[in-house]
């Protein structure tokens, strides 16, 4: 993992929270609470810039990678039809023992610049074995 990635912006884009997007997600969840849940997490931040954006941005070796955790902080639910700005950055890269950790944060803001949601994703790269 690239320790120099700390502070790097990996992706920045506008996302339209369409009713169709929310309906597809709610249907995939297949639960009574699916529509409410879809309004809370309509996008997984690590996919915003495309499938390799985070992997390449962190210099992550997928053969040794694990998902270490996900965290969400909500200010409010997403509103169908609104456009939000998402910015994905590398918050931290550090070693603990022989393993390396990368923390990627996505912040979703509304048209007024107010935070709607903050997602934190921790990746673990296990030590290489001999």
Image: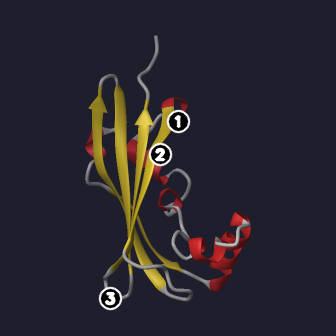
Distance between the alpha carbons at the discs numbered 2 and 1 = 8 Å
Q: Which mark is residue 55?
A: 2
Sequence-wise first label, 3 or 1: 1
Most foreground residue, 17 or 70: 70
Instruction: Write the residue at 49% across / 56% down.
Output: 46
Q: Which mark is residue 62?
A: 1
Q: Residues within 10 Å of mark 2 (few under 14, many from 20)?
A: some
Q: Residue 42 location, x and y as percent?
A: 56, 71
Instruction: Write the residue at 42% across / 36% down.
Output: 124
Residue 8 lies, with reference to residue 127, above or below; the image says below
Instruction: Write the residue at 31% across / 83% down.
Output: 113
Q: Can you tell which quarter of the image residue 107 is in?
A: bottom left
- Asked whether the beta carbons under mark 2 and mark 1 sit within 8 Å of each other, the answer is yes
Q: Which mark is residue 78?
A: none
Residue that label 3 marks: 112
Sequence-wise first label, 2 or 3: 2
Distance between the alpha carbons at the discs numbered 3 and 1 = 37 Å
Image quadrant where one finds the N terminus: top left
């Amino acid at each position: 993992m690239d320790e120099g990635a700390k502070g790097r912006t990996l992706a920045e884009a506008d996302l339209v929270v369409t009713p169709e997007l929310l309906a597809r997600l709610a249907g995939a969840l297949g639960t009574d609470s699916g529509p409410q849940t879809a309004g809370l997490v309509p996008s997984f931040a690590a996919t915003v810039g495309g499938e390799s954006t985070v992997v390449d941005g962190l210099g992550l070796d997928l053969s040794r990678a694990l998902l270490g955790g996900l965290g969400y902080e909500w200010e409010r639910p997403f509103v169908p039809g609104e456009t939000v700005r998402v910015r994905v950055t590398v918050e931290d890269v550090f070693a603990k023992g022989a393993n390396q950790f990368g923390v990627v944060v996505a912040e979703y803001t509304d048209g007024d610049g107010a935070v709607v949601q903050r997602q934190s994703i921790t990746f673990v790269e296990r030590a290489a074995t001999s």
